[in-house]
C-alpha cells in the first residue's frame, strides 16, 4: 500500500511539473524546490509505512528505538556544532601523547597546514627546519627578531659565507657578537612553508644552536603555546 501511495504522489507531482513548466513555480515553490519537496515526502511516506508495519503491535519498542535515533541525531548535531572546539581538545590530547622533543605535521580546520612540536627535556621547543634542502634543528625563540643561523648550519645549507659582512650587533647566550644579514628563498617546518625570509648568520662559534625567530613566526597564520605543545599553523 505504501508503495502505491508513494508512486501516486510522484505521479501527481510529475503532472503538476509538466503543466506548470512555463510558469516556473508551483504553490510559491520553484519547480526544482517543489520536485525535491515531493520526492522527500514520498520517501517519508514509504519509510513511515514500512516502519509502522515492522513495529505493528510493539509501540513500546518503536518508542524506544525512535528515542535512541533522536539521541544519536542530537549527538551528531552537537559534534558538528562544536567541531572547532573539539578539534582544539583533540590536538591538545594528541600533543600530550607525543614523545618529548618530537614534531608531527597535521591538517587543521579548513585544510590549513599545521605542525605540532613537543617541548624537549631541555625545556626548549626545537623544530626541524628545512633551509635549501638541509634539515636544521632550531630553537623556537619568540624573543629573536629574525631567524638566526649558526655559521656551521649556514654552510650545511649551501650558503656561501665568503665575502659577507658581519655588521649587525646581536646578543647571544655567549655574549655580544655580530651577524650578517641575508634572505632565504624558502624556509619550511614540515608542510608549513614561507618564502623570502629575512635571516641572520652569526660569526662561527658565537651561537650553540640556530634560532627560529619572528621573521618566520610572524608570517604564520598563528602560533600557539599550550602546555608542552607548540602548534604552528601556516
Image (cartoon, rainbow, N blue to C red):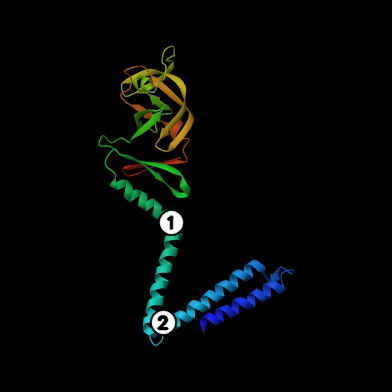
* Residue farthest left in this picture: 121
Rendering coords of residue 205 (x, y %): 31, 18
Rendering coords of residue 98 (x, y %): 29, 44
Which residue is at a point 37% across and 19% down the rendered structure image? 155
Residue 114 visible, this orientation: yes
Residue 225 occupies which quadrant of the picture? top left
Which residue is at a point 31% across and 21% down the rendered structure image? 174
Disc 1: which residue = 83
* Residue farthest right in this picture: 22
Between 127 and 139, the one lying in front of the other is 127
Disc 2: which residue = 54
| Label 1 or label 2, whichever comes before in sequence order | 2
Residue 26 occupies which quadrant of the picture? bottom right
Q: Is residue 29 above or below residue 213?
A: below
Count of numbered tags = 2
Left or right of 139 in this view: 46: right
Near mark 1 (Cα within 10 A), the count class, few <14, some 14-19 or many ≥20, is few
Which residue is at a point 40% across and 52% down the rendered structure image? 87
* Residue farthest top in this picture: 163
Left or right of 20 in this view: 103: left
SS type, badge 1 = helix
Rendering coords of residue 1 (x, y %): 52, 84
- Gap in Å between the C-alphas at discs 1 and 2? 36 Å
SS type, badge 2 = helix
Amino acid at each position: 500500500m505504501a508503495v502505491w501511495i508513494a508512486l501516486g504522489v510522484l505521479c501527481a507531482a510529475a503532472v503538476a511539473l509538466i503543466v506548470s513548466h512555463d510558469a516556473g513555480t508551483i504553490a510559491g515553490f520553484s519547480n526544482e524546490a517543489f520536485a525535491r519537496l515531493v520526492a522527500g515526502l514520498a520517501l517519508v511516506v514509504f519509510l513511515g509505512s514500512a516502519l509502522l508495519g515492522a513495529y505493528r503491535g510493539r509501540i513500546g519498542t518503536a518508542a524506544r528505538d525512535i528515542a535512541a535515533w533522536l539521541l544519536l541525531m542530537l549527538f551528531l548535531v552537537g559534534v558538528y556544532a562544536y567541531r572547532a572546539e573539539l578539534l582544539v581538545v583533540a590536538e591538545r590530547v594528541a600533543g600530550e601523547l607525543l614523545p618529548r622533543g618530537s614534531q608531527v605535521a597535521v591538517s587543521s580546520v579548513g585544510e590549513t597546514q599545521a605542525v605540532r612540536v613537543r617541548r624537549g627535556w631541555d625545556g626548549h621547543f626545537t623544530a626541524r627546519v628545512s633551509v635549501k634542502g638541509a634539515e636544521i634543528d632550531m630553537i623556537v625563540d619568540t624573543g629573536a627578531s629574525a631567524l638566526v643561523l649558526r655559521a656551521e648550519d649556514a654552510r650545511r645549507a649551501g650558503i656561501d659565507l665568503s665575502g659577507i659582512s658581519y655588521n649587525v650587533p646581536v646578543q647571544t647566550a655567549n655574549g655580544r657578537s655580530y651577524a650578517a644579514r641575508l634572505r632565504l628563498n624558502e624556509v619550511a617546518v614540515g608542510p608549513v612553508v614561507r618564502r623570502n625570509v629575512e635571516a641572520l648568520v652569526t660569526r662561527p662559534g658565537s651561537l650553540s644552536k640556530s634560532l627560529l625567530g619572528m621573521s618566520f613566526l610572524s608570517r604564520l597564520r598563528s602560533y600557539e603555546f599550550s602546555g608542552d605543545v607548540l602548534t604552528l599553523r601556516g
